């Protein structure tokens, strides 16, 4: 089935640093979603992107829908310890199909 | 409003026993999804319900797994004759339906441990 490749798989950063992660697909996506999963919880929707080139912010988080429609990026500015968790990208590989999820980026923030 | 709820939050069972996991979706959401997540891994799709349509069961790993959705609302995932490899977190999500939105909202999950 359709695969979404997320990178990096894991990140270890210091509090206050900026973070960037991305998600790529071999085919065109019309929607990109970014989720965060805290330890022991279900994933929570952070940002939804619906248009190529779109740049959307949610507090310190900014996500972009790549212009090729085959990738998306998530940036976190001035990281804090509560940013720790797994970040998943997701999108429908075809119009009207259910979401495919990436394998996740595990973020660790050292105080 | 209320989010997706799942019960129980934790379940420990002996190998060979049957278990039932419950999901209450967000009111008005016509689509419901079940996923499985092993420790430190990604989300493995299991089954998808959309309204009155036949469910997409393509992700169920074996015939020991089944799911129902009664009245278009509550769903139950049943695992028969549990095996140790069934140990994982089982997540449920709901959405307005693919005709309206791809955005899925997740419950907190049920952590299943098979001893």
Image (spheres, rainbow, N blue to C red):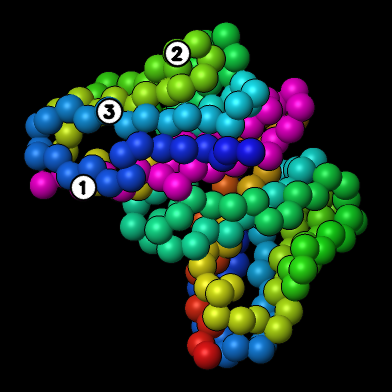
Q: Bin the neighbour count of mark 2 within 10 Å (Cα to Cα): few under 14, some 14-19, many 20 and up.
A: few
Q: Bin the neighbour count of mark 3 within 10 Å (Cα to Cα): few under 14, some 14-19, many 20 and up.
A: some
**Where does residue B88 sit, x and y in percent of width and height?**
30, 47
Disc number lying in front (2 or 1): 2
Of A100 and B22, nearer the camera is: B22
Disc 2 element: helix
Of A82 and A88, nearer the camera is: A82
- The Cα–Cα distance between marks 2 and 3, rounded to whole angstroms, is 14 Å
Decide whether residue B110 is among the magenta residues. Answer: yes
Q: Indicate left or right for B79 with B103 as reference.
A: left
Report if the CB atoms under discs 2 and 3 are less than 8 Å apart. Answer: no
Q: Indicate left or right for A103 with B6 as reference.
A: right
Numbered circle sitting on residue B70:
2
User: Which residue in the structure is indicated by mark 1?
Assistant: B113
Magenta span covers which residues? B91-115
Disc 3 element: strand
Mark 3 vs 1, N-terminal side:
3
Disc 1 element: strand
User: Which residue in the structure is indicated by mark 3?
Assistant: B20
Q: Are marks 3 and 1 on the same chain?
A: yes
Residue A54 higher or lower than B113, as above or below: below
Mark 2 vs 3, N-terminal side:
3
């Amino acid at each position: 089935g359709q695969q979404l490749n997320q990178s990096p798989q894991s990140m270890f950063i210091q509090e206050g640093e900026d973070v960037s992660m991305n998600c790529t697909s071999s085919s065109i996506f019309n929607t990109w979603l970014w989720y965060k999963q805290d330890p022991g919880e279900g994933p929570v929707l952070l940002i939804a992107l619906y248009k190529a080139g779109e740049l959307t912010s949610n507090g310190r988080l900014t996500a972009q829908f790549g212009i090729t429609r085959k990738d998306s990026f998530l940036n976190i500015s001035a990281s804090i310890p509560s940013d720790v968790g797994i970040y998943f990208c997701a999108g429908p590989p075809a119009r009207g199909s259910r979401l495919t999820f990436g394998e996740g980026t595990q973020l660790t923030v050292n105080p | 409003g209320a989010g997706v709820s799942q019960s129980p939050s934790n379940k420990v069972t002996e190998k060979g026993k049957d278990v039932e996991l419950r999901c209450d979706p967000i009111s008005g959401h016509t689509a419901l999804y079940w996923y499985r997540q092993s420790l430190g891994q990604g989300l493995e799709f299991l089954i998808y319900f959309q309204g009155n349509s036949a469910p997409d069961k393509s992700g169920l790993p074996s015939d020991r797994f089944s799911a129902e959705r009664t009245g278009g609302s509550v769903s139950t995932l049943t695992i028969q004759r549990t095996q140790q490899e069934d140990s994982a977190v089982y997540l449920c999500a709901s959405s307005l339906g693919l005709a309206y939105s791809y955005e899925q909202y997740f419950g907190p999950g049920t952590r299943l441990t098979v001893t």
